[in-house]
Image (spheres, rainbow, N blue to C red):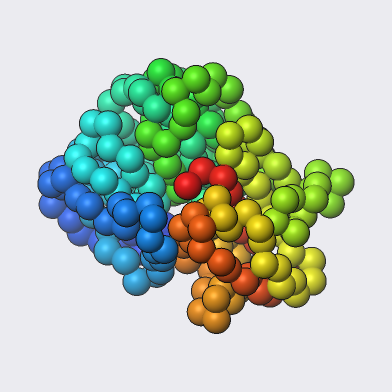
């Protein structure tokens, strides 16, 4: 389902030699009232507190315990994180391989939401890579979500922003998987509430700037945006959370 780009990015991550030590507190793209973008193919892998687990930091505001963070995380074969909880929740999408914890195995293309107060001990037997957001749910969110991304048009519905997609979560924020069948240009009214997307495959032009597979970007709330998305492109899209 996902482009080979993500498998190749995972392989690249495994060839990078890093010190086996936790990184110092980091601030990157932490000002949510500003637009931001990251090209994952040009970013640097950084170590995590767990041996064999590396990260590309997309958005981060502080240290390891309760920080708001968005990252791409690569697990080496037989690597794991110690059991921990998520006071304000966790969501992730498996980009390559199989991610696991005591609750189950999650193959590539699986989207998961673990609500505030949940805990787990993540691991990967054969290695995997995930996109993950931490500490960003509303405190009262108690919904656990496990969904496999689908390209079946029957699973896609009209979204507020003028596209169609598979709705993965729809409450105080909306999370969707979008596959564009034909070149599409929209000026979403939802930009007043902010938009975040991960370009899983394909190309997009946003406010006259070009983006490609592997790019992550955030359009701050209140900013106008025109999106032109190439035919066949796929993206993970979040609206209303900024």
> Residue, x 28% and y 37% (percent of image)?
67
Residue 94: % across, % down: 52, 45
Residue 173: % across, % down: 58, 39
Q: Quadrant of the N terminus?
A: bottom right
Query: Considering only vertical position in the picture, is 45 above or below 168?
Result: below
Which image quarter: residue 208?
Answer: bottom right
Query: Considering only vertical position in the picture, is 67 above or below 60?
Result: above
Judging depth in this view, the residue of 121 and 25 nearest the camera is 25
Residue 61: % across, % down: 26, 46
Horizontal side of residue 21 vs 129, given as left or right: left
> Residue, x 31% and y 23% (percent of image)?
84
Judging depth in this view, the residue of 78 and 161 nearest the camera is 161
Which image quarter: residue 233?
Answer: bottom right
> Residue, x 22% and y 37% (percent of image)?
64
Judging depth in this view, the residue of 162 and 37 nearest the camera is 162
Horizontal side of residue 232 vs 54, given as left or right: right
Judging depth in this view, the residue of 225 and 137 nearest the camera is 225
Q: Residue furthest right?
A: 154
Q: So how many labels did they put on this image?
A: 0
């Amino acid at each position: 389902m996902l482009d080979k780009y993500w498998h190749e990015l995972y392989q690249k991550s495994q060839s990078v030699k890093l010190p086996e030590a936790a990184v110092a507190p980091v601030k990157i793209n932490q000002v949510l009232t500003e637009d931001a973008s990251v090209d994952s193919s040009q970013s640097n892998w950084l170590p995590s507190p767990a041996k064999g687990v590396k990260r590309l930091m997309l958005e981060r505001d502080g240290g390891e315990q309760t920080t708001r963070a968005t990252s791409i995380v690569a697990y080496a074969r037989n690597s794991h994180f110690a059991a921990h909880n998520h006071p304000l929740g966790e969501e992730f999408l498996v980009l390559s391989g199989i991610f696991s914890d005591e609750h189950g195995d999650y193959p590539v293309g699986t989207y998961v939401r673990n609500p505030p107060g949940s805990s787990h001990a993540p691991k990967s037997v054969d290695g995997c890579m995930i996109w993950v957001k931490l500490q960003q749910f509303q405190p009262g969110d108690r919904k656990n979500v496990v969904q496999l991304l689908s390209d079946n048009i029957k699973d896609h519905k009209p979204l507020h922003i003028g596209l169609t997609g598979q709705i993965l979560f729809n409450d105080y924020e909306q999370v969707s998987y979008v596959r564009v069948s034909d070149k599409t240009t929209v000026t979403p009214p939802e930009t007043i509430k902010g938009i975040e997307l991960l370009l899983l495959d394909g190309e997009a032009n946003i406010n006259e700037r070009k983006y490609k597979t592997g790019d992550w970007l955030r359009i701050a709330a209140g900013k106008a945006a025109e999106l032109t998305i190439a035919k066949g492109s796929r993206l993970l899209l979040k609206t209303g959370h900024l």
